[in-house]
Image (spheres, helix red, strand yellow):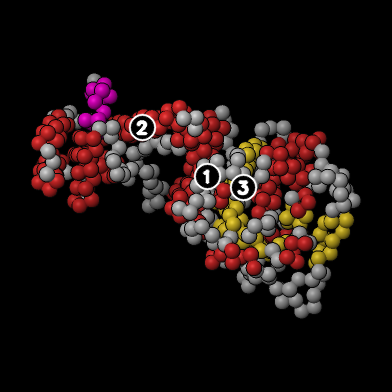
Amino acid sequence: MKVEKYQGSDLRSVLMGMISNDVLLSRVATYWEGGGLFDNDFANRIGDWCIMYLAKHKKAPTETGITRMFESWVDQTTPTEEMITATELFLDAVLDEDDEIDTSLLMQTAADYFTKVRITNEMVSVEGDLKAGHIHDAFKRVTEIAEISLKAIDYDKPAVDLSYWNQCLDVADRRSLFRYPDAAGEFFKGAFCRGDLYAFAGPDKTGKSAYLIDAAFRALRARHRVAFFDTGDSNREEVGVRFAQRIARCPHHTKDIMKPVKWEELPGADGEEKGDLELERDPERVEGVDAWAVKRVLDKYSHRLDKFRVACYPNSTLSLSGLRAQLRDWEVNGWVPDVVVIDYVDIMDMAGSDDLNKIDETWKGLRRLTQEKNCLVITATQTNAAAYGKTKGWLGPKHFSGRKTKNAHVVGMIGINVSSEERSTHQSRLNWIVNRYPNSYSGKPGVYLAGCFDVQNPIIISRW
């Protein structure tokens, strides 16, 4: 059978496909980079000629075109006679591959072959890392191996398919997975849906982790599966304590805690001025949190099912590929999260690099994760040094740190604004730095919040 023949001569059939098949060549071109994808120098040289021909003529070279590329290579690079003879013999052997193969089978053959070469090459480096005792480097290489796919991208037929429009316009598809009360609920109206990427942005020590822990708990309380990844901002026990505080609404140790009640009204308030915050002692939340109290709450919202997972990694060791590998392992065993919370993206492996392209790739990768898994991803990022001097102002696009294109990859970037006065009473203000789905409110720069960070709840009351 032809299939058996091509399984035994993948290199020749794939290279001949690049020479003669426009579709295959155009898809391979998206993966082609310096050095090529084959495990053979002659094949990579001919593959380079195919890619160059495609760039110039927008089609595969065919036998005639590749012969001209060979002649041009001989004339312009003056290779040795031995190299010319060897390349010519190799090219002749490829061009003798005259059996035709179905395009879809050719695509799969090429994808499998190139993926095999990629794995084989990487495993050589993995073996070297293992011999040198670099276990983390070896694991990182393995988890970052990306499969090559040459499948056609799915498409829709909007002119004839009514279901396309029904699906696009189905309000349920844009339903928030969890909600906030009062003004905060209006501020976040339509946010935090499946397939979205949101990020909280703010200076250091403004409560980014508390907002992420609170969001994770609200999603769990809404009966969703939640995966929480700590990338090194805290250790396993610290993360557990903070979740325990939020879930049981109790401080870590026995102490008096103050909860916000309301803001005093100011005559003629213009929206930028708020009255003093009225606080009162919470007599029910004095005792330190205990394990049974936390478990009782979790049982209530999860029905004793495995709906909440926490993974903690040392600083700068969790890469995006490692995160994807962990999700893939869970998925194999039937556990697929609805919400993924990452605390936080800036200290993921290479995300904090000075290489702006790597930062950009990390944010693009997070957006891709939401699209592929149809899940909500929430993370946080630090603003630049200019944001630290702010008092009652509001964060904006100019306060980005790292690479500004992170604002282009998110569905929404939420600014956390905290003055020193607000910090002392657990107040903060949120505003939209970026929002692809703006809400209907107007003339309001952001929402005012008061909470209790002793129980990891930044939003107890809110107002415009």
Task: Report how far apart the C-alphas of labels 2 and 1 lie in the structure.
Answer: 23 Å
Residue tagged 3: 343
Q: Secondary structure at mark 1?
A: loop
Q: Residue furthest bottom?
A: 268
Return the mark for residue 349.
Answer: 1
The x, y position of residue 14, in whole percent, is 25, 33
The x, y position of residue 325, in whole percent, is 51, 35
Q: Earlier in the sequence, mark 2 or mark 1?
A: 2
Please rate how many residues cluster around mark 1, counting C-alpha atoms within 10 Å: few if below 14, some from 14 to 19, many from 20. Answer: many
Task: Report how far apart the C-alphas of labels 3 and 2 lie in the structure.
Answer: 33 Å
Residue 174: in magenta span: no
Q: Is residue 395 above or below residue 71?
A: below
Query: Camera-side residue: 143 or 82?
Result: 82
Write down the region rendered in magenta. 2-15
Q: Is residue 233 above or below residue 273?
A: above
Kindly identify the residue that appears in the image at 28 percent across and 34 percent down: 38
Name the residue type under label 1. Answer: Asp
Which quadrant holds residue 33?
Answer: top left
Query: Camera-side residue: 39 or 306?
Result: 39
Name the residue type under label 3. Answer: Asp
Residue 227 visible somewhere in the drawing = no
Name the residue type under label 2. Answer: Asn
